Image: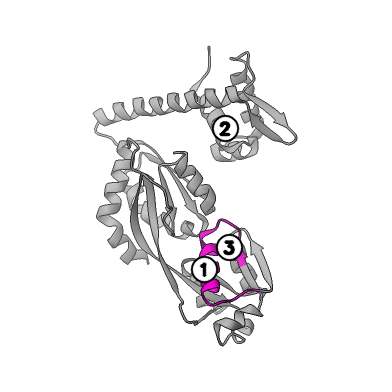
Amino acid sequence: MNYTLHQLRIFSTVLKNRSITLTAEELNLTQPAVSIQLKKFQEQFKIPLTETRGRGIHITQFGEEIGKVCKSILQEAEQLKQTSDNYLGLITGSLHFSVVSTAKYVIPYFLSDFKSAYPDIEIKINVTNKETVLKSLTNNEDDFCMVSILPDMPNTESLSLIENKLVLVGRQDLADQVKSPQDLARLPMIYREQGSATRLTMEKYLKIHGIQASNKMELVSNEAVKQAVKAGLGLSIMPMMGLKHELAQEEIQIIQMPGLPLVTDWQLVYNKKNTYSPAANAFIQHMNQNKKEIANKYF
């Protein structure tokens, strides 16, 4: 066989994303480049790795097994480089993070000084929803995950970073109509999608106060919810972390209500059964030593 590590990396990424488009975006390649390398890799085997179904790509059972071998080879290749670097006194490699959408306002600050201290470590961040983040943690697809509500999962460790405050917000004209939690039953409410930790927290608050929202809108990101709130389409319970500019410009208002703000913690979660690379161990050590200083400096 005459495959390359580049082809293995492309196939592993296709296996993860089930998409040529997403693979191209993640690897900073063109879609034709991904397709060409995927075809060359397929030529090494007499059994199909993939099948086209409609507009999607399906991985065959044989492809799934080959994918496991690809992942193992890539990990060994990474270990080979790290072993060489370690003998030179360097800490290199890559760290993969999967974070929920609101955490994009948090994670860069905890990575900034670390990246300065370890410039040879490559960092990749996937911003998505809670459901996908937990899936990546279960499948060991990423080194670290960042969530605001700890998952009920065995064999995980967590490191609390900073508080995550959720507040009820709305444009001034709607905010003026809210005098008690019961007023929320008659006003338009904007939700995140199913599986979002913010949505779960919001639904829990409404349930505690016996509120059944009659006018709902559902959006798939905090940024979309924020824009809808600014436009006066409804009220929402949102993490305060991503609202600093809008609050300062008085584009939206915090509405004081009993039981609010709701407070959780941003948690860095990782699989304690993993054998961690020098890069991952360096990051855990850096967080334990510097998280309080970082929180005080930026938040």
- The mark found on residue 223 in the picture is 3
Disc 2 packing (10 Å; few <14; some 14–19; many ≥20): many
| Position of residue 129 in the picture relative to residue 118 (left or right) | right
Instruction: Please tell me whether residue 265 is drawn above or below residue 78 in the rendered image.
Output: below
Residue that mark 2 sits on: 15
Compare marks 3 and 2 and give the one earlier in the sequence.
2
Query: Could you say which quadrant of the image residue 165 lies in?
Result: bottom left
Disc 3 packing (10 Å; few <14; some 14–19; many ≥20): some
Instruction: Please tell me whether residue 32 is drawn above or below residue 201 in the rendered image.
Output: above
Please name the amino acid that badge 1 sits on: Lys
- The answer to the question of whether label 3 and label 2 lie on touching residues, with beta carbons closer than 8 A, is no
> Mark 2 and mark 1: span between their CA atoms?
36 Å
Q: Position of residue 219 (x, y in %)?
A: 64, 61
Q: Which region shows up in magenta?
A: 191-213
Disc 2 vs disc 1: which is toward the camera? Answer: 1
Instruction: Say which quadrant the C terminus sits in.
Output: bottom left
